[in-house]
Image (cartoon, rainbow, N blue to C red):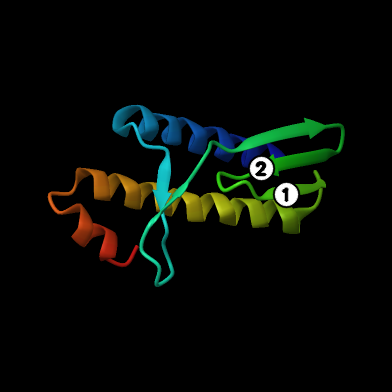
Amino acid sequence: MVRSLLKSINKFNEDFELYVKETGDSTLPTIDCTIIGFDPANKYSFLQRQHRVTVIDCDGNLYNFRDDDETSIMEVKEAIKYDRRRLAKAWRIWKSDNPDKELERYA
């Protein structure tokens, strides 16, 4: 399960790097709340040592768990899923003829 998690992280990082390279922007929109705006973001980072995994998500949240801890692995996968939605929204805003209107639309 950890292998697929790390694969998902690497894929997100590739997509995020492409977005930053194309747009020159390393922020992602805030979604699923009433606040409209953007937050600074970074690539995910991870460190795997013996039976422990440490992950830092694009917002700087730290996840430290054993490689057999399915609950924590699912939590990180949910974070990646959420950040993928933010990245998709960022692309839609950047490509939109009316970015403000797109930003106000529900994710």
Tell me what residue is drawn at x 80 percent, y 43 percent.
67
Foreground of the two, 14 or 24: 24
Position of residue 7 in the picture relative to residue 17 (left or right): right
- Give the SS element for disc 2: strand
Closest to the observer: 70 or 79? 79
- Characterize the local packing of mark 1: few (<14), some (14-19) or many (20 or more) Cα atoms within 10 angstroms: some
Question: Is 91 rendered above or below residue 15?
Answer: below
Q: Amino acid at mark 2?
A: Ile
Q: Picture coordinates of residue 103 (x, y %)? A: 28, 59
Give the percent coordinates (x, y) of residue 33. 43, 70
Q: Which residue is mark 2?
A: 56
Q: Which residue is mark 1?
A: 63
Marks counted in the figure total: 2
Instruction: Give the image location of residue 20, x and y in percent.
Output: 38, 32
Residue at the extreme left: 97
Q: Quadrant of residue 74?
A: bottom right
Q: Quadrant of the N terminus?
A: top right
Instruction: Please give left or right for residue 78 compared with residue 17 in the image.
Output: right
In what element is the residue under mark 1? strand
Q: Is residue 80 left or right of residue 75?
A: left
Q: State the residue lying farthest toward the right.
A: 50
Q: CA distance from mark 1 to mark 2?
A: 6 Å
- Which residue is at a point 26% across and 65% down the rendered structure image? 105
Amino acid of disc 1 = Tyr
Dividing the picture into quarters, in which one does residue 24 lie?
top left
Identify the mark at residue 76; answer none if there is no mark: none
Disc 1 + disc 2, Cβ < 8 Å: yes
Q: Earlier in the sequence, mark 1 or mark 2?
A: 2
Q: Residue at x 15, y 54 (%)?
A: 98
